[in-house]
Amino acid sequence: MDFYGYFRSSSSYRCRIAFNLKGVAPRFKQVHLKNGAQHEPDFKALNPQGLLPALVTETGDVLIQSLAILEWLDETYPTPPLLSQNPVTRAQERGFAQVIACEIHPLQNLRVLKYLTGDLGVDEAAKDAWLTRWIREGLEACEGLLAQRREHTEFCYGNAPGLADICLVPQVFSAERFGIAYADLPHISAAYSACQKLAAFDKAAPKNQPDFEA
Ligand SMILES: N[C@@H](CCC(=O)N[C@@H](CS)C(=O)NCC(=O)O)C(=O)O
């Protein structure tokens, strides 16, 4: 299997955590986002969207979109499961993951920030205000969802990490990178700290990737 990613890409980070939890080790192919490698014809032949991640399976099939890759991974390598056995909890986990992957992350993405500062001529202060507005509001929604749980478990939805944690950790990493406060959100901070203690999460961290650049 070939996994196309980039150390700082949060959707790649989600997949890396899941690979580690499942004990799956695809070959890593770097796509240097900062240098624009996602726009090269070779990569766009794989993912016409020009976005990471992309996974080429053993059968040569191309999978894109991190949530779809995570679901495929969970169906193909069922142990340990990334989703609860309970359908209600499963829907809550997916809802939480989608708040991050569909509502927060797209607004902090490189192409959006480049459009703001380049095409629209927005200055750094306005860009920072944009990031704070969307990331902080999104994390507050995540905090509210965790506060609603019937049981306050160690990880987001249970006593083992799952889909919600896989999405939460890269999002909190991005919040830190962009200087957005989250320490006052107790449920998020607790789940994040619990994940940080696990080797699967540590090994997936941007600083531990072969293409890491300071
Ligand atoms: N919804 C997609 C998001 C994909 C995405 O936005 N990837 C980012 C990296 S995290 C990217 O490739 N950005 C390149 C760019 O903006 O030019 C997913 O979950 O896979």
Image: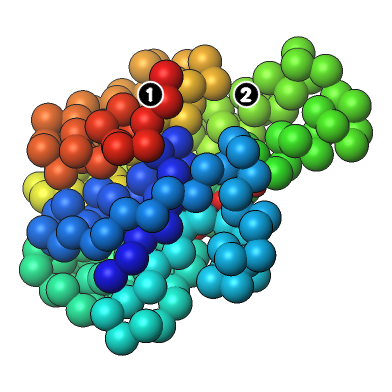
**Disc 1 element:** loop
Decide which of 173, 39 is in the foreground and name it: 39
Give the left or right position of residue 49, taking residue 6 as reference: right
Q: Is residue 140 visible?
A: yes
User: Percent from the top left, x then y, of residue 166?
Assistant: 30, 48
User: Percent from the top left, x then y, of residue 137?
Assistant: 58, 32
Which label's residue is closer to the chain start, 1 or 2? 2
Outermost right residue: 120
Q: Amino acid at mark 2?
A: Thr
Q: Residue at x 71, y 35 (%)?
A: 113
Residue 150 drawn above or below residue 183: below
Q: Amino acid at mark 1?
A: Leu
Q: Which residue is mark 2?
A: 132
Q: Is residue 10 visible?
A: no
Outermost bottom residue: 59
Q: CA distance from mark 1 to mark 2?
A: 15 Å
Q: Which residue is mark 1?
A: 185
Q: Residue at x 75, y 16 (%)?
A: 124
Quadrant assignment for the C terminus: top left
